């Protein structure tokens, strides 16, 4: 996997001693973090493959390099998380570099631990063992988390190595010892807390959250893991989850009738669940998210959904929300459209053909608006029209093989190289038969299977969408979802999907940058024009959101 990280055999080993590695770190290219970190990984690979004795001096070199390279690693992680729309090539290179650093440092610490276990009496690194174990546990947790970002399943042997490290800490009695895992940490931790964090995050690696959501939950667990506890004796009133430290998997829900084994450890999250409830109550009372330890990236109302999702995943079996409709295996294929512009263009074209209408000729409303404002058609408008025109010309939807179906969605199986645009939160439209209407849906879950395929879970809206043109009517002082400097007053008309048939009101799916609560639009459909006001956001994803609206006139 990391074959591109290679060193020339003739180069001097920068990790030969502590003085050399310190000087070498200072000579790394300061203006190119990716290249600098790549060189660090190259040296770590050479370090782990050197086959030299696990001496105290070599451990100091590894720990120093790890400590000094963490700031660069965090910068790369931040770059990855803040650029979800990067190209597949860039995403792959960045993910691989980040994962490789976690992999090689963890591999190094694990090797020192195994050497100590094999010869505890003759080892000179015993005073450092608690910190080595804590760093190794955190390293495995980071590896797991970055696998979750790509919807990959963690191999059983990695879980067993993690469990083994915790059992070593438990056997030697330092599992609860509090220490600073890294010098820059803001708070002390322990092997137990680091182990709990990896366990509690594992139910969220099922492919139903975006990388930024997983990262946010991991940030919360940084501060909340001390509220959970690991026990060796089962208590039915407190223990709803357990881990088998001899088995190749993570956290498991306790079920009646399970026979306890010596390797079982039982997780008490009673206080953690109480914290969930306190935080939600405080948010509803107007408390600031940052004051509750939720981080600066926490936003409402989406944050409520993420908190509810976390609370549901970590609730008892009786309180957990379950699937409302069962899946039925099915064969065949379905047509798939992606992105709001492509969906609107395809549905509108088919609607025009059905009613015997010709495509509009002459200037588009966007071009007319540009001429009125600037006297010419802007390049941005030309680009938007070109993208829509491409969507209208493209009559070929993707073909996905069906796996199962339910009243609220479908499951499909894709090969690893097919539809690389697929990710959680993507808007799409699908239909199982050309004679049927398109169903609008959202990708909710992605699971990577061992044979290099992915199972995609799509939740669908069981209502027929209608394409409408929306045009600004009245500016609003409300905060918009726009991420650029676009002026609301100068925005050209655009297309959206309207759903007037829901029991709890009418809904619209539109570009997220055009939304603000209370904003008014002229909504033009085939049946006429209405003046509407946008209300609350009900769902949102990559570049789109769904909100309910009320008709003013």
Image: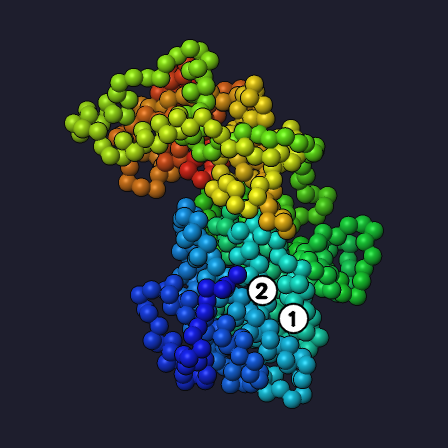
Q: Nearer the viewer, residue 38 or 125?
A: 38
* Location of residue 156 in the rendering, given as x and y in whole percent from the top left corner: 67, 60
Residue 139, numbered label? none
- Specify whether residue 538 is in view: no
User: How far is the residue under mark 1 from the one under mark 2?
Assistant: 10 Å
Is disc 1 in contact with disc 2, using a CB cutoff of under 8 Å? yes
- Specify whether residue 41 is in view: yes
Residue at the location (50% across, 40% down)? Answer: 419
Using the image, determine if residue 481 lies above or below residue 52. Answer: above
Q: Nearer the viewer, residue 104 or 483?
A: 104
Q: Quadrant of the C terminus?
A: top left
Q: Earlier in the sequence, mark 1 or mark 2?
A: 2
Q: Is residue 534 left or right of residue 173?
A: left
What residue does disc 1 label? Answer: 165
Q: How many marks?
A: 2
Examine the image and state in which quarter residue 73 appears: bottom left
């Amino acid at each position: 996997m990391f074959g591109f990280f290679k060193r020339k055999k003739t180069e001097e080993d920068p990790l030969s001693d502590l003085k050399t590695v310190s000087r070498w770190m200072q000579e790394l290219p300061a203006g190119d973090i990716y290249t600098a970190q790549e060189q660090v990984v190259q040296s770590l690979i050479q370090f782990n493959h050197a086959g030299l004795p696990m001496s105290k001096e070599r451990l100091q070199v590894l720990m120093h390099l790890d400590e000094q390279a963490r700031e660069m690693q965090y910068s790369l992680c931040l770059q990855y998380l803040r650029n979800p729309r990067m190209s597949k090539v860039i995403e792959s290179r960045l993910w691989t570099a980040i994962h490789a650093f976690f992999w090689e440092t963890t591999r190094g610490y694990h090797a020192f631990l195994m050497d100590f276990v094999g010869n505890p009496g003759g080892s000179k690194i015993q005073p450092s063992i608690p910190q080595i174990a804590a760093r190794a546990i955190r390293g495995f947790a980071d590896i797991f988390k970055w696998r979750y970002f790509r919807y990959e399943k963690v191999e059983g042997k990695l879980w067993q190595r993690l469990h083994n490290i915790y059992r070593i800490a438990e056997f030697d009695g330092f599992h609860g010892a509090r220490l600073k895992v890294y010098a820059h940490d803001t708070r002390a931790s322990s092997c137990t807390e680091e182990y709990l964090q990896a366990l509690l995050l594992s139910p969220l690696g099922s492919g139903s959250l975006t990388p930024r959501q997983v990262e946010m939950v991991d940030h919360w667990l940084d501060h909340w893991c001390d509220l959970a506890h690991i026990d060796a004796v089962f208590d039915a009133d407190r223990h709803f989850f357990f881990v088998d430290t001899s088995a190749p998997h993570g956290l498991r829900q306790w079920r009646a009738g399970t026979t306890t084994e010596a390797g079982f450890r039982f997780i008490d999250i009673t206080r953690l669940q109480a914290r969930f409830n306190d935080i939600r109550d405080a948010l509803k009372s107007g408390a600031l998210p940052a004051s509750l330890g939720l981080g600066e990236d926490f936003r409402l109302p989406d944050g409520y959904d993420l908190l509810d999702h976390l609370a549901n995943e970590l609730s008892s079996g009786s309180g957990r929300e379950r699937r409302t409709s069962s899946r039925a295996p099915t064969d065949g294929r379905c047509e798939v459209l992606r992105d709001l512009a492509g969906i609107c263009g395809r549905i509108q074209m088919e609607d025009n053909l059905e009613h015997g209408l010709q495509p509009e000729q002459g200037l588009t409303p966007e071009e007319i608006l540009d001429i009125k404002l600037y006297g010419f058609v802007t390049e941005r408008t030309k680009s938007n029209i070109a993208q829509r025109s491409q969507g209208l010309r493209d009559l070929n939807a993707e073909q996905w093989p069906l796996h199962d179906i339910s009243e609220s969605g479908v499951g499909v199986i894709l090969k690893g190289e097919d539809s690389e645009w697929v990710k959680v939160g993507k808007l799409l439209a699908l239909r199982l038969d050309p004679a049927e209407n398109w169903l609008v849906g959202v990708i909710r879950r992605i699971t990577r299977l061992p044979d290099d395929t992915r199972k995609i879970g799509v939740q669908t809206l069981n209502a027929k969408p209608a394409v409408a043109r929306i045009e600004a009517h009245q500016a609003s002082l409300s905060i918009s979802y726009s991420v650029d400097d676009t002026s609301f007053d100068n925005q050209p008309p655009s297309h959206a999907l309207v759903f007037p048939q829901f029991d709890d009101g009418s809904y619209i799916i539109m570009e997220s940058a055009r939304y603000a609560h209370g904003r008014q639009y002229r909504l033009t459909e085939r049946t006429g024009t209405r003046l509407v006001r946008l209300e609350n956001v009900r769902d949102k994803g990559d570049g789109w959101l769904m909100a309910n609206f009320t008709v003013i006139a």
